[in-house]
Image (cartoon, rainbow, N blue to C red):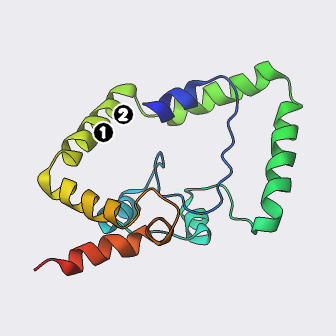
Amino acid sequence: MFLHRLADVPVITIAKVRGRARGGGNELGRARAIEAIAGADDFDAVLAERYGWINRALPDAELDDFVDRLARRIAGFPPEGVRAAKRAINDLTLADPAHVRSDAATFQGLIALPETRERLEYLADRGLQKPGEVEHDLGKAVAEFRHRRP
């Protein structure tokens, strides 16, 4: 629900990502959704841009200037016009809150499964959600878990 609430805020939000983005909040096409979710792999910025998951992939040296320019440009427009544009886009593209809640409930149910807990413990022991190799290449770490099982 956080992403739904964030989408409902009457101002434009800009995310500047250095490093990994793993698909949370993306509107995926069916085939891509199956690949990304069931395959549990990481995608580089160029492919994420091609899939439409991010607006653009930029070299690190250009990222800060681009985001600054975009934020200043949007801030220079009349606020009511920006709010109206965001509302119109939300009306056409934002999932119904009931669907978001249903997806969150499914996720919570999956997290509670013993198999999921075992996998999370395996990954946590190796550095999940800490700076390092596992976070840098989570897709590889997930595959290593699969390969270690009989």
Residue depicted at x 84% and y 47%: 68
Image position of 64 with respect to 106: above or below: below
Q: CA distance from mark 1 to mark 2?
A: 5 Å
Q: Is residue 79 left or right of residue 132?
A: right
Residue depicted at x 10% and y 80%: 150
Q: Quadrant of the N terminus?
A: top left
Kind of residue at badge 1: Asp
Circle 1 crowding by C-alpha within 10 Å: few under 14, some 14–19, many from 20: few
Give the secondary structure at mark 2: helix
Q: Is residue 12 left or right of residue 9?
A: right
| Residue 114 vs residue 33, the one in the foreground | 114
Count of residue discs: 2
Residue depicted at x 37% and y 59%: 33
Q: Find residue 47 and report its horizontal and vertical position in percent.
A: 56, 70
Give the residue at the far top of this rendering. Answer: 80
Image position of 28 with respect to 86: above or below: below
Kind of residue at badge 2: Val
Give the secondary structure at mark 1: helix
Q: Is residue 109 left or right of residue 66?
A: left
Q: Find residue 100 and report its horizontal and vertical position in percent.
A: 36, 34
Can you identify the residue that label 2 sits on? 100
Q: Quadrant of residue 40?
A: bottom left
Residue depicted at x 25% and y 73%: 145
| Residue 72 vs residue 30, the one in the foreground | 72
Circle 2 crowding by C-alpha within 10 Å: few under 14, some 14–19, many from 20: some
Q: Are marks 1 and 2 in contact (CB under 8 Å)?
A: yes
| Residue 47 vs residue 40, the one in the foreground | 40
Q: Quadrant of residue 107?
A: top left
Per the rendering, the mark at residue 103 is 1
Q: Is residue 55 left or right of residue 98?
A: right
